[in-house]
Image (cartoon, rainbow, N blue to C red):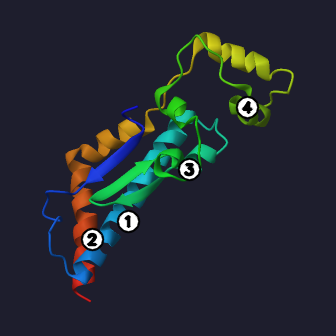
Amino acid sequence: MVDDRITFDIKGTIFDQKKMSPAYRKGLEQGLKDVGSEVVQTAQGKLQAGKRGFDTGALKGSIGWRKTNYGVVIASGAAIGDKALTYAQFAEHGRGPGKMPPREAIEPWGLKHGFTQATIFLLQRAIGRRGTRGIFMFRDTAKEWNGRKKRKRLEQLITHSLAKALNK
């Protein structure tokens, strides 16, 4: 799936220099860490708004970031090598009608929201018949951070960290 992660790649930009001093590298890494943390918060907020409170918190907690050679990747834990949450793609893109979700995937949520062991099947069948809407937390966050205002914020975070590291 295309929209199950957000990638910031600084290769070929002013921040991508072949010979970096240790202070410059440290500042750049701190800047990327700040960017990753802020984008994760945005994605988690979009998840929370999209779920309207109907979640167990596991998916929100699994959204994280990891550093790459030339930037950062923000995704659900399964995509960045952490906790394996297989339903992140269904939360992002929704689930079309036609197939019921597996019981073990829907049971923890159903039990937390008032379903019993006996009525979980009804929830599975309803999802199988109607499907679910996607939240598009990663797609919308990527769109937002690709806008002029957030790109400026991305620049600010990195340049601030670089200035701080180089002025020590």
**Is 22 situated above or below 160?**
below
Residue 57 horizontal/vertical position (percent): 63, 46
Q: Earlier in the sequence, mark 1 or mark 3?
A: 1
Q: CA–CA distance between discs 2 and 1?
A: 9 Å
Q: Is residue 79 left or right of residue 155?
A: right
Task: Check disc 2 and report the residue beneath it.
Answer: 28
Q: Name the front one of labels 4 and 2.
A: 4
Residue 62, numbered label? 3
**Amino acid at the residue labelled 2:** Leu
Would you call the spot at circle 3 few (<14 residues within 10 Å), some (14-19), or many (20 or more)? Answer: many
Q: CA–CA distance between discs 4 and 2?
A: 42 Å
Q: Name the front one of labels 1 and 4.
A: 4
**Amino acid at the residue labelled 4:** Glu
Task: Check disc 1 and report the residue beneath it.
Answer: 33
Contact? badges 3 and 2 (CB < 8 Å): no
Q: Name the front one of labels 4 and 3.
A: 4
Q: CA–CA distance between discs 4 and 3?
A: 18 Å
Could you say whether the residue bearing mark 1 is in a helix, strand or loop? helix
**Is 11 situated above or below 26?**
above
Residue 114 horizontal/vertical position (percent): 80, 30
Would you call the spot at circle 4 few (<14 residues within 10 Å), some (14-19), or many (20 or more)? Answer: few
Q: Earlier in the sequence, mark 1 or mark 4?
A: 1
Q: Earlier in the sequence, mark 4 or mark 2?
A: 2
Task: Check disc 4 and report the residue beneath it.
Answer: 104
Could you say whether the residue bearing mark 3 is in a helix, strand or loop? helix
At horizontal 54% and vertical 37% (from top left) the residue drawn is: 88
Q: CA–CA distance between discs 1 and 4?
A: 35 Å
At horizontal 44% and vertical 38% (from top left) the residue drawn is: 137
